[in-house]
Image: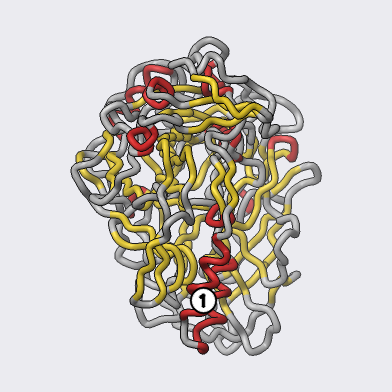
Amino acid sequence: MMFDCPCFYWKRIVDFSPLELRTFSLPAPIPQWPPGGGFSSGRINLGELEVIKISNFEFLWSTNESSDPHEGVSFYKPVGIPNGFYCLSHYCQSNNEPLRGYVLVARPVTSSEPAPLQKPLDYRLIWSSDDGDVENHEGLGFFWLPQPPEGYKPTGYLVTNTSEKPDLDEVRCVRADLSDECQAYRILSTTRSKYLKFPFRVWSTRPSHRGMHGRGVHVGSFYCSCYWNSGEELCIACLKNLDPSLHAMPNLNQIHAIINHYGPTIFFHPSEIYLPSSVSWFFKNGALLYRAGNPVGEPIDTNGSNLPAGGGNDRQFWVDLPNDDRREKVKQGNLESAKLYVHVKPAVGGTFTDIVMWVFCPFNGPGTIKIGVMNLSLSKIGEHVGDWEHFTLRVCNFTGELWGIYFSQHSGGVWVEADDLEYIEGNKAVIYSSRNGHASYSRAGTYIQGSAKLGLGVRNDCARSNKFIDSSQDYEIVAAQYLGNGNVPEPNWLQFMREWGPKIVYDSRNDLNKIINYMPLRFRSSVEGVFNKLPVELYGEEGPTGPKEKNNWVGDERS
């Protein structure tokens, strides 16, 4: 028998009994969605395979370095698999989270040859917790990689609590052309041994090809190895959606129902003065279009019909605030007109739907630097005309369940799963928009962009107030390309690929150096290091490009 990682010393606390599992359900029942297509039908056709989501599991084995039973990870096998469907992988998740994950099981829907699914020829033991001291192997963990026939790939691992190989009928391998590459995503567990140079690690996985055009389908599996290096191809694959119709995506009526049911409420800080507005209000109240070499701005039609469309950001055009007495008023936005601009697109190979909600603010205010207990309000640093921010609802196409929300935060962001969201009414979550900068957060509080450990960086302050937008009502769908041409007419302004504000460079670095020189000597190097990592937009004013020029318009969110 070949061993990928022969660990024979187990230095951690292991509890072989199943944990008392926590589960999660959304605060309110999921409604009956409008009819049509395959959305929320429970099954998704991928071409030659049909898959369903299994969320019922049988506990197999758990590992933990801590005495806290809610630390560590546990491994499970899917149960209740319908006749004709086959297991593709076992499942792993952290013990400190509610058991809410899934694995896909599959069945062929064509009689094509070679068959879409095949039994493995054998199993290879990848790793076990056996330290060699006991003859009875029961209660230990054994990790097996299916060995596929030629032309097939495994999509996950099996875990047992005895040294006997699993039955060959317990899992199926998928034909290579029905698979896609997957990648190790987040580390779940690390096990160290005094006999091995490298630890045994377990990661969650995700498709390598994601975004609007990605067809990789997550099986729900994990990846494990002692010797894998970042960037190397994995020995397991995910599935590929070869159905060009993406029949499980919601139709237009279903999209409206999803937004009405899940649309979050966005709260702005009580001290926020740079509020959002609709794009048409911005244009109607004096926004100007400038062309390079011409100092005179041109008024913009309310619907943006005179904006140059298409192409890329050639820096030949930009938008600016009015240059008359309306300028300060427009800076402050108009909450009454504000709405969310919605882009609907496939995610995870069409097994999920991303509802991307964009909010426009005419002006982004200056930042506040936190240095320990001191807060220094900046007069210019961080300001720019035009601010496009977004958050994204990810909805499961098997059930119509809200799976999580992506909170965009300046140059990055974070996914928050549905069980960790704050809800305001039914299944509607809360979004907190940070003061002046409009980054999105899932909880009220102060977030430091820099070094939270040192208390150094730009403050992002979030709190509830009477300034809010209810996105379940105040929205406009501006794009859903998968529905076909003409189903969702895109507004003229969405085709403007240039910057929504002028570029102004000023010596903000000199201002930051003054702050550094004000600090005690022992803190200066730490402060300077944090300032060097701050986003470049702090060192000058430059309006952002619109939604279509952002990476996540076509691609996946950054996380």
Query: Tag 1, which secondary structure?
Result: helix
Q: Name the residue under label 1.
A: 516
Residue at the far right: name it: 150
In the image, 410 versus 247, the foreground residue is 410
In the image, 309 versus 177, the foreground residue is 309
Position of residue 16 in the picture relative to residue 184 (left or right): left
Q: Residue at coordinates 30% horizontally, 61% vertically from top-left?
A: 445
Question: Quadrant location of the N terminus?
Answer: bottom right
Q: Can residue 170 be seen by looking at this rendering?
A: no
Q: In this view, does 34 lie above or below 428?
A: above
Q: Can residue 449 be seen by looking at this rendering?
A: yes
Q: Is residue 420 above or below residue 350?
A: below
| Position of residue 187 measured from the top left corner of the image (x, y, whole percent) | 55, 65
| Position of residue 109 measured from the top left corner of the image (x, y, whole percent) | 60, 26
Q: Quadrant of residue 80?
A: top left
In the image, 73 versus 406, the foreground residue is 406
In the image, 419 versus 107, the foreground residue is 419
Q: In this view, does 519 lie above or below 539?
A: below
Three-letter amino acid code of the residue under disc 1:
Ile
